Image (spheres, rainbow, N blue to C red):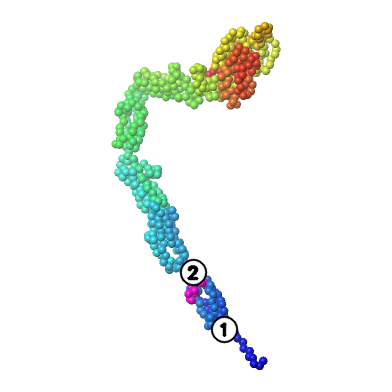
């Protein structure tokens, strides 16, 4: 076309060159040829252990946005080596440190070590002993450990009594040997923490520690006899001053101890050790023998036997074993501990017997249900010590009536009436008394049926020997049956109070194999009635004497 010219216009390409102060310190991206005026980004990424510092144009941006200049350009990235400083304590409970962080290699940094109360700064792990110091950062992430410690104080309770070693300042948890050495006439007793080793190892603790060695004065006790053929003594030795020591004089056969040289007359005595020591001489003299023995060594032991001066007063003691009691000496004396005057060779024998507890099987095969002394009834029941109840209810194998063949339940029996109605009713708390009184009135013939109302014709009297009191009065335990035999004076029908004790002590505790029915007591209410106790619930009532209730004999044990 005329009048126009065609000419291509091209943008100029120039080179952007990226350089680093050390190619090993980091990576550069973004260099190359670009059109002049183009907006580009160049990147500087530090290697591990280094940081980007700045470009040669002063920019500190690691990602730099630039406009490509005419003629190109060179951008140089400066990388700097860094190192992590670790500052720590050998034990954090002893103190604190500062200065940890990441810094430029070659930079100067201040690190500090500050002990907590009672502790001390000892040194750094490189031997430097400045608690606050400046270090030049080195490559390789160096560590600095502050070595803290504490003071160990070792003293005595009295410097004139002994010496100690081990005092000083030590690193945390360091093991140190401390010693305690007594002077003459003293001994090492223990440290203030109770340890009794004179030479010991201790560990340093935060805040420090004080160990006090306790020394004690000692002295000798010498104990001897006035004549070694008369006897021997014990107790000689070295003891703490102020300590209580027992010395004993042991006479030879045919001799007795008289006194010590200080006039003390205790054959076994306690003395207090004094500074400088003391000598004790036992004086022995001729004696006679008192022999004390038990009737059975398994039932009880005795003491007080030995040899004594003629006319001397001594104490003999009888000590029963568990489950047994002292009864008397062979001369009839009933004091378990008694004094005797020695007039020559004498023999004493202590007699022991069994102790029963409520619920135990008694000597007649029954069950103990009252401990008389424990109840405080000794005066009332003397000479008895316990009450024993038969193991089973009375079972009679006979017709109840004198005439006829009617034979009801043979475990149930009448109380029985007695002939004549002018008898005073004066019941006792003791079933034994009641039982004997009833037997004396009724003998072997208790009235079963009668009437006392005026104008009425009495029924024909029916008698029986098998009434409650008589069944107990003649009770004899038998392995097969409880057969009534000739009267004996040690079994009796319990009183109302004794029956209640039987119920509370045995029935309520599942002992005695009792029925839940009523049981007769020997306590009368009127001529026509007597008290009975129901063993299902402990209810007490009075019933006509012709009622048939259970009967359980009891007896006293001396």
Residue 493: x percent and y percent? 58, 16
Is 126 positioned to the left or the right of 451 in the image? left
* Residue on which disc 2 sits: 50
Residue 109: x percent and y percent? 42, 65
As displayed, is residue 484 above or below residue 60? above
Secondary element at tag 1: loop
Residue 430: x percent and y percent? 54, 16
Helix, strand or loop: magenta stretch: loop
* Residue on which disc 1 sits: 12
In front of the other: 307 or 374: 374
**Can residue 60 be found in the magenta stretch?**
yes
**The N terminus lies in quadrant:** bottom right
Q: Residue at x 56, y 22 (%)?
A: 501
* Highlighted magenta segment, given as a residue range: 53-62
Secondary element at tag 2: strand
Q: Residue at x 37, y 60 (%)?
A: 130
Q: Quadrant of residue 541?
A: top right
Residue 539: x percent and y percent? 61, 22
């Amino acid at each position: 076309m005329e009048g126009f010219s065609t000419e291509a216009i091209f943008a100029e390409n120039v080179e952007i060159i990226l350089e680093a102060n050390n190619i090993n310190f980091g990576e550069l991206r973004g260099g190359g040829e670009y059109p002049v005026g183009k907006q580009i980004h160049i990147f500087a990424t530090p290697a591990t252990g280094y940081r980007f510092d700045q470009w040669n144009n002063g920019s500190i941006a690691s990602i730099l946005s630039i406009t490509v200049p005419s003629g190109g350009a060179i951008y140089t990235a400066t990388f700097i080596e860094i190192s992590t400083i670790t500052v720590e304590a050998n034990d954090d409970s002893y103190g604190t440190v500062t200065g940890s962080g990441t810094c430029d290699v070659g930079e100067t940094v201040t690190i500090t070590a500050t002990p907590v109360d009672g502790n001390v700064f000892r040194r750094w792990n490189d031997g430097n002993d400045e608690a606050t110091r400046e270090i030049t950062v080195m490559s390789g992430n160096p560590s600095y450990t502050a070595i803290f410690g504490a003071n160990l104080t070792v003293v005595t309770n009295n410097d004139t009594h002994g010496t100690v070693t081990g005092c000083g300042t030590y690193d945390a948890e360091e093991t140190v040997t401390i010693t305690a050495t007594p002077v003459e006439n003293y001994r090492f007793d223990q440290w203030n923490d109770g340890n009794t080793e004179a030479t010991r190892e201790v560990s340093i603790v935060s805040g420090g520690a004080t160990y006090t060695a306790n020394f004690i004065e000692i002295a000798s006790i010498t104990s001897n006899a006035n004549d070694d053929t008369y006897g021997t003594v014990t107790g000689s030795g070295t003891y703490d001053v102020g300590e209580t020591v027992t010395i004993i004089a042991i006479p030879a056969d045919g001799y007795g101890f008289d006194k010590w040289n200080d006039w003390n007359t205790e054959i076994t005595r306690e003395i207090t050790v004094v500074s400088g020591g003391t000598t004790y001489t036992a004086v022995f003299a001729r004696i006679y023998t008192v022999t004390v023995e038990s009737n059975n060594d398994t039932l009880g032991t005795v003491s007080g036997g030995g040899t004594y001066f003629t006319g001397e007063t001594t104490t003999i003691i009888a000590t029963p074993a568990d489950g047994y009691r002292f009864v008397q000496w062979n001369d009839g004396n009933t004091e378990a501990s008694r004094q005797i005057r020695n007039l020559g060779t004498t023999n004493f024998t202590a007699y022991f017997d069994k102790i029963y507890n409520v619920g135990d099987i008694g000597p007649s095969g029954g069950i103990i249900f009252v401990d008389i002394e424990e109840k405080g009834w000794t005066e009332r029941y003397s000479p008895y010590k316990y009450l024993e109840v038969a193991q089973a209810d009375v079972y009679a194998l006979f017709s109840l009536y004198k005439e006829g063949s009617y034979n009801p339940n043979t475990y149930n029996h009448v109380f029985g009436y007695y002939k004549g109605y002018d008898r005073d009713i004066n019941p006792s708390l003791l079933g034994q008394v009641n039982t004997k009184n009833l037997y004396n009135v009724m003998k072997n013939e208790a009235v079963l049926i009668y009437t006392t109302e005026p104008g009425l014709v009495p029924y024909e009297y029916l008698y029986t020997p098998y009434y409650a009191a008589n069944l107990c009065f003649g009770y004899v335990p038998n392995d097969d049956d409880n057969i009534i035999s000739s009267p004996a004076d040690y079994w009796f029908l319990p009183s109302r109070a004794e029956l209640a004790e039987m119920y509370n002590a045995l029935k309520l505790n599942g002992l005695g194999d009792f029925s839940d029915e009523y049981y007769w007591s020997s306590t009368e209410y009127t001529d026509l009635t007597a008290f009975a106790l129901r063993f299902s619930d402990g209810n007490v009532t009075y019933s006509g004497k012709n009622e048939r209730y259970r009967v359980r004999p009891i007896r006293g044990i001396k």
